[in-house]
Image (cartoon, rainbow, N blue to C red):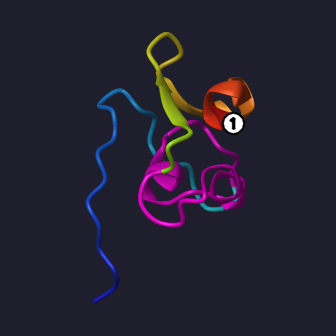
Amino acid sequence: MGDRRLIHIHVHAPPKPLQGEGCNGCGVCCLLEPCPLGVLLTQARHGACVAVQWDDTALHYRCSAVTAPRAVLD
C-alpha cells in the first residue's frame, strides 16, 4: 500500500484534471503538499500549503502567492 492521507476539499471544487493537463483549481496538489514556490515562501515542506485559498466567486482554489503575494509574505 502507498502513502495515504486525507485532505479536505471544498465540495464545489472541480475534479482533478488528467495527468498532463493544466491546473484547473481543484486544490488537490496544494492541499496535499506545498509546491517548490510554497516551500520557499513559507518554509513548510509537509501538509497543505498555507498559500492555497478557496475563491467562493470562481468556485476554485488559487495560489495566493500569485493572487495576493503580500498576504503570503506577511
Q: Position of residue 30 (x, y in %)?
A: 52, 50
Q: Is 31 located above or below residue 2 in the figure?
A: above
Taking the image as shown, residue 35 lies to the left or right of residue 47, namely right
Q: Which residue is depicted at the point 73% across and 32% down? A: 66
Q: Residue furthest top?
A: 57
Q: Secondary structure at mark 1?
A: helix
Depth check: give the residue in front, 43 or 18: 43
Q: Amino acid at mark 1?
A: Ala
Q: Quadrant of residue 8?
A: top left
The magenta stretch is 21-48
Q: Which residue is mark 1?
A: 65
How far from the left and from the top, in percent, is residue 60? 50, 27
Q: Quadrant of residue 69?
A: top right
Nearer the observer, 56 or 16: 56
Q: Residue furthest bottom?
A: 1
Residue reaching furthest to the front? 74
Quadrant location of the C terminus?
top right
Closer-to-camera residue (37/22): 37
Crowding near the residue tagged with mark 1, few <14, some 14–19, many ≥20 C-alpha atoms within 10 Å: some
Residue sitting at x 72%, y 53%:
37
Tell me where residue 40 appears, x and y as whole percent. Answer: 71, 57
Above or below 72: residue 56:
above
Residue 28 among magenta residues: yes
- Compared to residue 43, the image places residue 61 above or below, namely above
